[in-house]
Image (cartoon, rainbow, N blue to C red):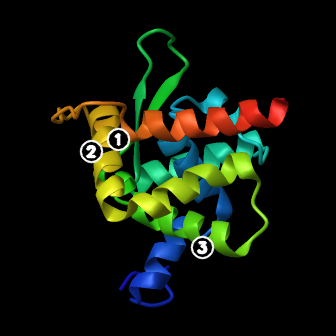
Amino acid sequence: MDDAQRSGCPINLTLEILGDKWSLLIIRDMMFGNRRHFRELLTKSDEKISSNILSDRLKTLVEEGILTRVDDPTHKQKGIYSLTEQGIELLPILAQMAAWGFKYLPVSEELGIRAELLADGGPKMWNEFMDELREVHLGTRRRRKSGPSVGERLQKAYEAVVAKRKK
């Protein structure tokens, strides 16, 4: 066991990588918001992460194999972040956390709709969404199903709630 680790407990070891709220929110924004650049992650999150914390968490997530970073071919100083398979496999955990929060906490309707749909869709929907994420982040091809993707359905439901609230 590494001296920096407090124990070999799998929950402890996972928390040592993902135990702060910012890491999970970065992963959430990449999964559900398709935010892949530093600037998008910095400016498009309701939680308002500071640039130094974002930089630190991205560095840690890359070092731990949750994300990868490649140079953006359109701009020398930009990078494109992608989820790795390890990162993609966090989706069921985030879906369960969202379902728990939806059930027990005063979530907003527009931000709770995705949690509700993912809870209702269960593991079948999660697996389909993970395949979509693999295509976007890892470049793997998937068999296309007829109709909208999970990501599109989640976004459409969110937009419908936002539009309804504006009326």
Label 3 sits on residue: 100
For the point 19% across and 35% down, the residue is 140
Answer with the quarter of the image where residue 93 lies: bottom left
Q: Are marks 1 and 2 in contact (CB under 8 Å)?
A: yes
Amino acid of disc 1: Leu
- Nearer-N-terminus badge (3/1): 3
Answer with the quarter of the image where residue 150 lies: top left
Residue density around tag 2, few if under 14, some if 14–19, many if 20 or more, within 10 Å: some
Locate the C terminus and report the quarter of the image it occupies.
top right
Is residue 9 something one can see in this rendering? yes
Q: Residue 146 placed where, x, y %?
A: 24, 31
Distance of mark 1 from mark 2, alpha carbons?
A: 5 Å
- Residue placed most toward the observer, 87 or 146: 146
For the point 47% across and 57% down, the residue is 118
Distance of mark 2 from mark 3, alpha carbons?
A: 24 Å
For the point 33% across and 63% down, the residue is 123
Label 1 sits on residue: 133
| Mark number, residue 131 | 2
Answer with the quarter of the image where residue 98 lies: bottom right
| Disc nearest the viewer among 2 and 3 | 3
